Every structure is written in C-alpha cells, then in structure tokens.
Image: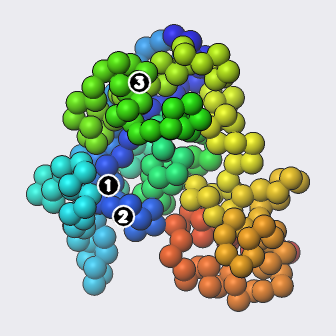
Amino acid sequence: MKLQLQRPLVFFDLETTGLNIGTDRIVELSYYKVYPNGTSEGKTLRLKPTMMLLGQETQMHIADEATAVHGIHDEDVADCPTFKDVAQEIAAIFTDADIAGYNSNHFDVPLLAEEFLRAGVQIDLMKCARVDAFTIFQKHEPRNLTAAYKFYCNKNLEDAHSANADTMATYEVLMAQLERYDDVPTTVAELQEYTAGKNPFADFAGRITYDQDGVEVFNFGKYKGQRVADVFRRDTGYYGWLLNGDFPQYTKNVFTRIYLSSRQ
C-alpha cells in the first residue's frame, strides 16, 4: 500500500435526513478503519434520527428527497439506537485517528461534529487530519464517486448511495489515486493540505477562514475578509445576530470563543 500512515485512518460516509448541516441528522454511518500495520476493521450503523418537539424527544422524519437517494425510510430506523445512544462508541472510532471521505470536508465531517455536540460528547475533530478524495478527483478527473470508481478501479459501483458501498468505494478510489498520480502525497498530513488547501477553515462549515497571519476572518457576508475579533469589537450586535442565525452549532461555538477573547 502506497499510503503512509503514522496513525489510523478512518474512511467514513454518512446517510442523513437531509442536507442541512445544522439541523439534519445521521441515519446511517459506515466506516473502514485502516491501521499503520496494515490491519483494518469496519462497521455500518443504522441510527434513529431524533429532535426535540414540545419538550419531547421525537423521531425526525427523513426527507423524501433524501430517501430517494439512499433508500432509507422512517420505518427502517424506528427501532435503531439514536446517535446519542452510541455516541461514545462512535467517538472511540475517531479518537487518535485521522479521517478520510468523499466530499467529507464540506458535509460529512461538519454534520458529524454537530451530532457529537448535541450528544454532549467531547471530541475535537479539528485535531484529526482530514483527507478528502473528492478534492483529488476534482483536480484530476472532475466527476462524481460513481465515475471515479469506474475510472480509477474499472468497476461499476453497485448499491451507490448506501453508506457501506460509498465508504469502501472511497477507500479503493484513494488507493488508486495514490498509485496513479506521482504528485499526490502519501502521508495523511500532506494529503490534508493537498485536499483542504494551505488556509484551512476555523470551522467545519467554512464560514471562518484564516488570513495570512493565521488570524480568523469571516468567509461570508458583509464583513467577508475582515478579522472576526475586530468586527466583534466594533459591532457587538453582529455577534448576537450570528448566534440567532441558521449556523451549525460548531460554527457558533467558534464565534463565541473569538468573541470572548475579543472582550478581554
């Protein structure tokens, strides 16, 4: 295997109730964990999505559009554990490991971080190197996972959009990319820079990035490009607006950390 590992690398994929990072929930999580010694393990978990409604935890409806993609219906997960039920088990999978996925930096990782926050489980996914095979694919062969699997592995992706099939396909695609392209690095740290860029985001949703001095700046809105702390000092009302806005909780937590630092 061309991939050089210093610690375990977890390939994973999520199927969800929808596409909103801040409000949607996981209904299926599949992972394939590769260890530096070459051993591996994997598992697929079905989860019942829940939300608080009138003070009661209630099963959340899987959007019809989402079901049309992954084929999972409300009744399929009605008797499954919730994310909170198995959050510690899932956290153990990612603890002291790095992460790989397909378009995972923009969707799967941010949504997973939100689920951990709701479950009250302390795990900092920012400490994990995050490798996105989709970015490598975009740079060399910009299509989708099914096309990538056919191009790199010369196989048809059966059962596409099931978490397990997509997870295993992502693993095979990344291995094939490493074999095909001499300019693609083989360490996880270098792969993260290659797929995420030299200026990674301060939050998973990409709302906050860094300037050339490594200071957090807004990546959206009327203050785009301006330092977050400087804006909070000038416009304290903007911080309140952000907390009430439709942003993922992880992003709000980063805003709060910067806000508190700016008041010292």
Q: Write the residue at 65% across / 16% down.
A: 182
Q: Write the residue at 22% across / 35% down.
A: 159
Dot 1 surroundings within 10 Å: few (below 14), some, or many (20 or more)?
many
Dot 3 surroundings within 10 Å: few (below 14), some, or many (20 or more)?
some
Residue 255 lies, in percent from the top left, at 67, 70
From what the image shows, is residue 195 above or below residue 123?
above
Q: Is 127 placed left or right of 11 in the picture?
A: right
Q: Is 193 placed left or right of 34 in the picture?
A: right
Residue 235 lies, in percent from the top left, at 78, 86
From what the image shows, is residue 245 above or below residue 118?
below
Q: Write the residue at 51% across / 32% down.
A: 141
Q: Mark 3 to mark 1: distance in Å?
A: 27 Å
The residue type indicated by label 1 comes to Thr
Q: Quadrant of residue 244?
A: bottom right
Disc number for residue 145? none
Where's the C terminus, which quadrant?
A: bottom right
Residue topped by disc 3: 151
Dot 2 surroundings within 10 Å: few (below 14), some, or many (20 or more)?
many
Q: Nearer the viewer, residue 264 or 186?
A: 186
Residue topped by disc 2: 24
Given contact means CB atoms under 8 Å apart, are the residues at marks 3 and 1 in contact? no
Given contact means CB atoms under 8 Å apart, are the residues at marks 1 and 2 in contact? yes
Question: Please, what secondary structure does the residue beneath circle 2 have?
Answer: loop
Question: Please, what secondary structure does the residue beneath circle 1 have?
Answer: strand
Q: Mark 1 to mark 2: distance in Å?
A: 7 Å
- Say whether disc 1 or disc 2 marks the residue closer to the N-terminus: 1
Question: Please, what secondary structure does the residue beneath circle 3 have?
Answer: helix
Q: Write the residue at 83% across / 85% down.
A: 234
From what the image shows, is residue 124 above or below residue 74?
above
